[in-house]
Amino acid sequence: MAAMALDKQKQKKQQQQQRVTASSDVPFPSASAEMRGHMVPASQQREASQPDSTAASSTAASPRVTGASDVPFTAAEMRGYKVRLSDDRAAYPTERRCAMCGKGPPAVPSLSTCGECRLVSYCSLECQRNHWRAAHKNVCKDAKTLSNVGAFRYDNEAPVKYVYGMMSEDEFYELQRRKEDQIISELASRPLTKVSMGLVLTRFRHVNIGLLSYVKRGERDSQATSAVKGARVYSLKEDACRSGALHDSIDYPTFRFARLSLDTTPFSELHPDSLRSMLARLVRAASRAIEDLILSYFEKTRHLPILDPLIEVRSPLDMLFWADKTATVTIGGKTFVFYFLPDMPTICTDAVVHSCMRLFGEDVTEQVGLTGNVHLSKSEQFLKRNHLKGNIVHFMQQHHFQEYVNKLCQRAATKSHLSFSTVKERLLEKALEYTDIFRKHLLDFSADMAANTMGGWTLAGALGVTDAQVQAAREEVQVLNPRYWPYLKSMRESLAHPPPEHHAQSDGRMLTLADGERVSEIEMMLSTQGLI
């Protein structure tokens, strides 16, 4: 019976995540409270007024604590502690209030918005001047830039406010939980074909988890709509399962957003232990998001959602794919696996960037620019060499990148006494060699997919291709016999090591719970907010 009604809906969501009697005025640590300057290394104190800080919040977060003994819960009670404290029936403070003094309607008759980023409001010119000097000057420009990124446009600015300290941790996650419930309720009300998940790393230490749902409709039905703030609706003709049914897709670009690390080091300079810690938390956060989606959907419909077993990731999270990492959920005593898969722009970018490095000894990462206009028209392009070649050629022909690559090829041609076209063809072949490695890894990585996925998905089913096309790709790759390039081997070896038990720069300080258990700041924040 649906695995005993999904293990009695995962023991009624862990007994509503293990009820404890508590009131919202009980003090306990949070990342935002902990990072206000008195409990962090000097190198991190500067973050209080910098981008990505949870410390520069202009709204109240959890009360500070004076010591680890003030944590009022045990390890068993920690998971979802703040979720239990929230009252989803209560009116939550409006997002539109003075960023300096906190006043909002009806206490003040009107509010003006920052004319640059348009993310914060003020009740007076004096408050605006004071807040500009105190905090906003340091983040306004960068916040405006992030708010124009695809996922955060269209009235979807709450994550940007959280990242740049314009909204407290507690308020943001409370609003996010309400939005998640609204999204799942909307999914539950539609005749879904399937739901896909995608991950993007934002500011290199926050993960943004988005959903894409496919909604079946008849010929006479009108196009689907969405009441969710920030959702986007697209009309398509044929669903991903090749059933021939008309359907629309609804993109929820920010289903769940979470900070994964307290380390502010640029991503390319991260210590290996910091990187391993962050990626391990990302996998746990993705697994928890999938579990919560399944349980909440089941609670509303009494049946399971059709979930895509492939989680789309964008660089640099493609390292999860190369390191054989997977998200897992356990339901009804069975563990189901979800596989991370790079999107096509990431595959093209990495193929060209690393080929330039191998042929010319030059890093062209900064010249690549945006690659969002590398289009994928059919899923089989992940498996067919000539289709991958077409995408790479299209990628290299982008106006902002083509001239630079041509200069590299011309320089190499002059030096080696070869023709320009010969060098350009060698670059393309080297890039295709990268895609051969990608295809082999994908085929090997997904070999047991049918036995491990919820619904028994095969790779052919997940990509929307035939078993014969998968077999043809397997035979082609076997003949080519590509080998991992040195940087891929090095990455795989590095990420094969388990994360450290504690890495202070990434995890923050260690805290003692009421039962004597020790956990890090970031672990406590994510767990109490119900994110891992």
Image (cartoon, rainbow, N blue to C red):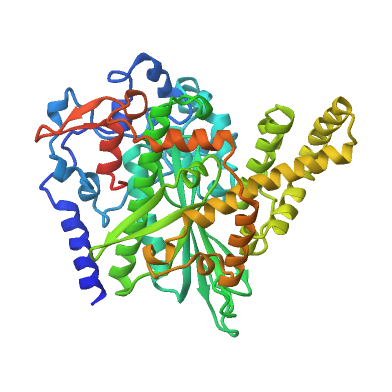
- Is 391 placed above or below 261 here? below
Image quadrant in which you'd find residue 185:
bottom left
Can residue 120 be seen here? Answer: no
In the image, taking residue 322 as reference, residue 149 lies left or right, namely: right
Image quadrant in which you'd find residue 501:
top left
- The percent position of residue 22, horizontal first and vertical second, equals 13, 44
The residue at 51%/39% (across/down) is: 119
- The percent position of residue 340, horizontal first and vertical second, equals 47, 51
The residue at 71%/42% (across/down) is: 430
The residue at 24%/71% (across/down) is: 3
Residue furthest front in the image: 479
Residue furthest top in the image: 42
The residue at 19%/26% (across/down) is: 65
Which quarter of the rendering shows the N terminus?
bottom left
In the image, taking residue 52 as reference, residue 400 lies left or right, namely: right
Can residue 432 be seen here? Answer: yes
